[in-house]
Amino acid sequence: MAATIDQVLSQFTPEVKKVNKHEGKTLKAGFIGTGWIAEAYAKELPLLPDLKVVALSDLIPGKAEEFARTWGIDNVRFYASGAEMIDREELDLVFVCTYNTQHAPNAIYALEHGVNVLCEKPFTVTLEEAVEVCRAEKKSGKLLSIGFQPRMDDNMRNIRKIVESGELGDIYYIQTGGGRRRGIPNSTFIEKKTAGIGALGDIGCYSLDLVLRAIGYPKPLTVSGYTSAFFGPDPAQNNPADAARFNVDDFGAAFIRLEGGIILDFRIAWAMNIDTPGDTILLGTKGGLRVPSTDCWNGSFEKPMKVYKTVAGNNVEYEIPLKKTPEGLFYRKIRSFMDAIYEGGEAPVPSAEILYNQAIIDGIVRSSEVGREVEIVIPEI
Ligand SMILES: NC(=O)c1ccc[n+]([C@@H]2O[C@H](COP(=O)([O-])OP(=O)(O)OC[C@H]3O[C@@H](n4cnc5c(N)ncnc54)[C@H](O)[C@@H]3O)[C@@H](O)[C@H]2O)c1
C-alpha cells in the first residue's frame, strides 16, 4: 500500500528544536509551486522563526490559498504564477517547488530579479537549461542551491569523509544506482510536458550525487546510455489512466567515463523484475567501500557500510557504524541555505557540481536516442 503523505514527510521531521542564531534578522520567502513537495518545506516552518513566508504562487487557481490554510500560513499574498509574485514582491528568497520543466524558467527569473533560489531536484531537464540557470546565477551574484536533501544525512556525508581519508586509495571504478521493484509515481512525474524526464530525473540524480559528491565531482567526459519504458505505459503494470499518458523513461542505465580515468556504472528504475539493482560500490587502489542498496531519496540506509582491505596478505572487512542524523533533512536543507544567505557562504548544494549531474543525465538521454556513446561537452558558464 502506498505510504500516506504524513508517513513520508515524517521521515524528514526534525527531532530537536532549533534557535535562530541570526538574532534580529529575518528572510522574506515566497513559494513557486504549492504542490506535494512544498508541503515538506511547510512542515519545517515552525522550526525556522527567522523565515517569513510572505507570498505563495501556483498556476492552479485556489491551490496556494488551500496550502496556506492547511499549513497555517497567515498574512500572505497569493499569485497566479512565480513570475507575477517576483514582479510584485520584495523577496529575499524563493523555493522553486514546481514540476521539473518549470525549474529553469523560474530559477532564471528569480535570479535575474535579485532573489536567492533554493530549487528542487532534478536541477533542470536538459544540460542546456542548467547552463542557462548557472549563467543567470553568476550574473546575479545571488545564491542558488539545489534541493538534494540526502546530502544532509550524516551517513551520506560519511561516504565523502571515508574517500577523503585516503583509506580507499585512488578510486577507479564505481557502481551505483537504485530503484524499486514496483514504484512508478503518477501526477506530474510521468509526462514530458511537466517532468521532461522520468526515473532518471526523479531518483537517478540522487544516486549520481551520492557517489559524485564523495569523489569531488570530476568532470564527466563520455556516456553510453540506455533508457526504456516497459512498465509505465503498460495498462497491465500501471493504472490505465496513468499508462495512457505516460511518456517518460522508467528505467535508465549508463557507463560513464569521468576525468581522472574513473568509470561510473549506473542504473535506476521505477519498476523492474528484481528486488534491487545492487549495492553501491566504490573500488579504490587500497580499499573498497560497499554502501548497501538504499531508497536514497530520503538519505537513509538501514545497514552499515563496509570497507574491504587487504592487510599483510589478509583480507579484512569492517563496518562503519550507522549514524543518526539529529535533525530532519529538509530542516537542514532550508537552514543551511538561509545561513549561507546571511553569511555569504557557498551554496550548500552548489550548481557548479549539479551541472555535472545534469550533464550526465542529459548525456544518457542523448546516447539512448542515437544508440551509441556520446561526448559530454559542458559550455563555459
Ligand atoms: N526533494 C525531494 O525529496 C522531492 C520529492 C518529491 C518531489 N520533488 C521535486 O519537487 C518538484 C515538484 O514535485 P511535486 O510532487 O510537488 O509536484 P506537484 O505537481 O504536486 O506540484 C508542483 C506545483 O507547481 C505548480 N507550478 C508549476 N509551474 C508553476 C509556475 N510557473 N508558477 C507557480 N506554480 C507553478 C503546479 O501548478 C503544481 O501545483 C519536482 O521537480 C520533483 O522532482 C522533490
Image (cartoon, rainbow, N blue to C red):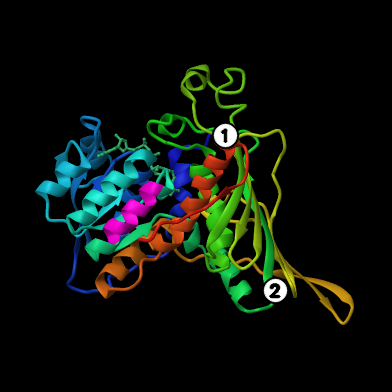
Q: Residue at x 18, y 70 (%)?
A: 25
Q: Which residue is mark 1?
A: 250
| Whole-percent x, y for residue 172 in the image | 69, 66
For residue 344, side relative to residue 278 (left or right): left
Ligand 1 shows up in which quadrant of the image?
A: top left
| Whole-percent x, y for residue 185 in the image | 50, 33
For residue 370, side relative to residue 349 (left or right): right
Q: Is residue 194 visible?
A: yes
For residue 321, side relative to residue 129 (left or right): right
Q: Which residue is mark 2?
A: 168
286 w.r.t. 75: above or below:
below
Q: How many marks?
A: 2
Q: Residues within 10 Å of mark 1 (few under 14, many from 20)?
A: many
Amino acid type, callout 2: Leu
Region of the chain picked out in magenta, as a range:
128-137
199 w.r.t. 160: above or below:
above
